[in-house]
Amino acid sequence: MIIILLLIKTIRGKSSRVKLETIWIMPLLIIVSTAEDIFRTSNVTIVDGFIFLLFTGIGLIFGILRSKFLRFENDEQTGKVVYYNSIISLGIMIVIMLVKFYIRRNVTDLIGGINPLIISDALLCMTCSTIVTRKVYIVMKYTSIKKIYRKN
């Protein structure tokens, strides 16, 4: 359902205003939730830590890919910076969701001997790093656009 709403919003060309006041609320909630889930998982080993880092790195790559397809504009009337999602960014998000679904379904067949809770937490790390990377990119583009318009 969420994907359908995002697809409609993307196709219609709806913009989202960059709101620096609230941009970090959702990423912080996801970071806290992910950390809480990891700390609740008992007997986390060094190998598990490497799995978390691997999935965090994969999420970082997905976040960079999704961010590269955002389009930014400075609204001349209001002076606000807005961004538009693209179909490609939405497609990448769908691929991420399908990969996560496949891994969750086939975790015991793919990786023997690893606790499914660890894989679930690693997927949360991937989601978390994707969101944080995208938000960092949005803030960086926002500040660069504002610098350009302040000079003019």
Image (spheres, helix red, strand yellow):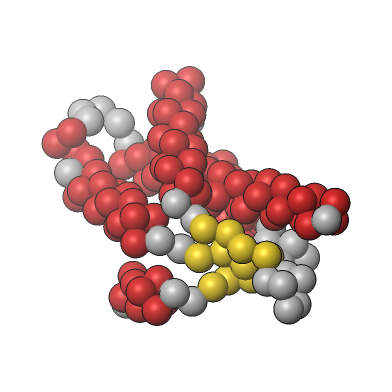
- The residue furthest top is 46
Counting from the top left corner in percent of width and height, residue 19 is at: 71, 67
Q: Residue furthest left?
A: 109
Seen at 35% across and 78% down, the residue is 8
The total of numbered circles placed on residues is 0
| 152 shown above or below 68 | below
Between residue 22 and residue 37, name the one nearer to us. 22
> How far across and down, in percent of the image, does residue 12 sit?
40, 79
Q: Is residue 114 above or below residue 93?
A: above
Placement of the C terminus among the 4 image quadrants: bottom right
Q: Position of residue 66 (x, y in %)?
A: 44, 49
Judge whether 103 appears above or below 73 on screen: above
In the image, 45: left or right of 104?
right
Q: Residue at x 65, y 50 (%)?
A: 141
Residue 41 visible: no
Quarter of the image for the N terminus: give it: bottom left
Task: Give residue 69's position: percent from left, percent from top.
Answer: 44, 51
| Image side of residue 58 versus residue 23, left or right | left
